[in-house]
Image (cartoon, helix red, strand yellow):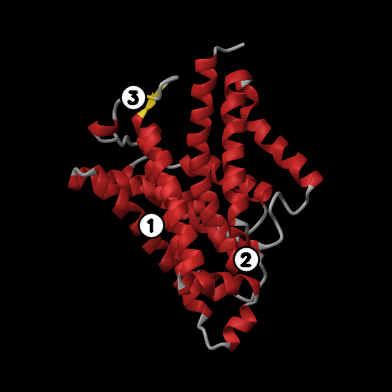
Amino acid sequence: MPELSTLLAQVFTGLVLGMIYVLLAIGLSLIFGLMTVVNFAHGALFMVGAYFGVFLLSYTKSFWGAVIAAPLMVGALGLLMERFLIRRLYGRSSDDPLLLTFGLSLMLVEGVKVIWGKIGLTLDPPRALAGAVNLGFMSFPAYRIFLIGVTVAVLVGLYFFLGRTNIGLIIRAGSRDPLMVRALGIDLSRVWLVVFGIGTALAGLGGILAAAMGGGYAEMGVTMVIESFVVIVVGGMGSLLGAVVAGLLIGQVVGLTTLFIPKAAEIMVFMVMSVVVLVRPSGLFGGAGLARCA
């Protein structure tokens, strides 16, 4: 039986991993909840966020600038993808956007290998976050606490954006009844563009934050996107609240299983999903889409 300090450290590690899952799953849920597009390129955009961060840091020497600019660059790439590629497939079979984004993910991975090479890159956090913080009952890396704080701030900002702004209200209304929103004279194509940009920017933010812990490499998004899809299935497709709860839950499952049974960590993720789907097929918070974010 591990010591209490070791157990607490692993719980916090699971919380950090859960926050990365949340950033990815929130973006996936936003896009699916409004557009019913399963974005298979999300993991590749997560990876691109890490590489953009390394690129920006090498030129600007500012980690803080890279953390702000890299997600914006990924979001801009997402805007281009939606406007010129995915938008052409609306109204067709749901398999078409899935196949398109799967192809885009392969292109992005190979493109990164061509530009930056097959060897992974490192991204060091700033000196201010290089040490550990004494929490009283244990010491924990300052950067990981920073990552938790950034994710919480993003979630709070997203909550107020969706619940207190006109654009946010249109997004929520569009997820419930797009025909009525169109009848009111609102151009939903612009709303879809904004949502896709926000969703992909969140993936980019997750990528650069994760890279500062373990570096960046071309295939880093493959496992993460699979587990992020598990998160949104467990939480409920299209539910933002479900994405947050399930992301934290899966993070703890991975963290604690790694401590007790390391070889079973990846299997446990799918076991949890299987149990949830058997008991509640729509997921923990499924069935209400974006309306459940409040």
Q: Are marks 2 and 3 in contact (CB under 8 Å)?
A: no
Query: Badge 3 is on which residue?
Result: 132
Q: Identify the image quadrant of residue 293.
A: bottom right
Q: Residues within 10 Å of mark 3 (few under 14, many from 20)?
A: some
Q: CA distance from mark 1 to mark 2?
A: 21 Å
Q: Residues within 10 Å of mark 1 (few under 14, many from 20)?
A: many
* Residue 129, position as x, y percentages in the image: 29, 32
Query: Badge 1 is on which residue?
Result: 74
Q: CA distance from mark 2 to mark 3?
A: 42 Å
* Mark 1: amino acid: Val
| Count of numbered tags | 3
Q: Is residue 119 visible?
A: no
* Residue 220, position as x, y percentages in the image: 46, 40
Q: Are marks 1 and 2 in contact (CB under 8 Å)?
A: no
Residue 112 badge: none
Helix, strand or loop status at disc 2:
loop
